[in-house]
Image: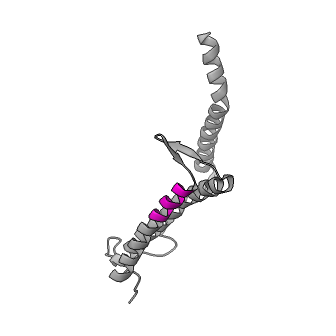
Amino acid sequence: MMIAQADSTIAAYAPVLVLVATALFMTIVIQILGHGVGPRRKGAVKHAPYESGMPLFSDAQRRFNVRFYIVAVLFLLFDIEVVFLWPWAVLYRASAAAGEPVAELGGMVVGAGYLLVGGTLFLLILLVGFIYEWRKGVFRWE
């Protein structure tokens, strides 16, 4: 009985193993072909640092204005907001359309009203953060 279960488990993972083996084989073959067939050019220009097609004009460790980082963090914040709101909206729509509870959390039945209150609180917290950032002048580019 135990051997039959092990065989079925291996059979279930066989396509994944074949895919991994194929990917490894193709990677090795492409690397070997690239080194064996590819051109070999050497020189000062070939060994010079290269960044996006532009020659280096200053030190890579220069300081950036903190606004760039703030904008990046704000983008991540509101991007993650959408990631959390999408499943909430789908679940809320299903609950509101069905008119009955969707799930049970720790003995508490979760319906459309509970989901609406939770989503509203989430958006209010984000709105407070947005207003705080606005008053701090994060969105002013002078």
* Position in image of residue 37 (x %, y %): 63, 50
Q: Nearer the viewer, residue 85 or 101?
A: 101
Snapshot colouring: one colour
Q: Nearer the viewer, residue 142 or 87?
A: 87
For image coordinates 44% across by 66% down, the residue present is 77
* Position in image of residue 6 (x %, y %): 60, 17
Image quadrant holding the N terminus, namely top right
In the image, is residue 103 above or below residue 79?
A: above
For image coordinates 62% across by 56% down, the residue present is 90
Question: Which segment is the magenta one?
Answer: 113-122
One can see residue 72 in this view: no
Q: Nearer the viewer, residue 29 or 101?
A: 101
One can see residue 92 in this view: yes
Looking at the image, the residue that sits furthest to the bottom is: 142
For image coordinates 41% across by 67% down, the residue present is 125
Q: Main secondary structure of the magenta part?
A: helix
In the image, is residue 60 above or below residue 98?
A: below
For image coordinates 64% across by 42% down, the residue present is 26
Q: Quadrant for residue 122, please give it.
A: bottom left
In the image, is residue 64 above or below residue 18?
A: below
Q: Nearer the viewer, residue 18 or 54?
A: 18
* Position in image of residue 56 (x %, y %): 41, 75
Based on the picture, tell me whether residue 10 belongs to the magenta stretch: no
Compared across the picture, whether 89 is left or right of 105 comes to right
Image quadrant holding the C terminus, namely bottom left
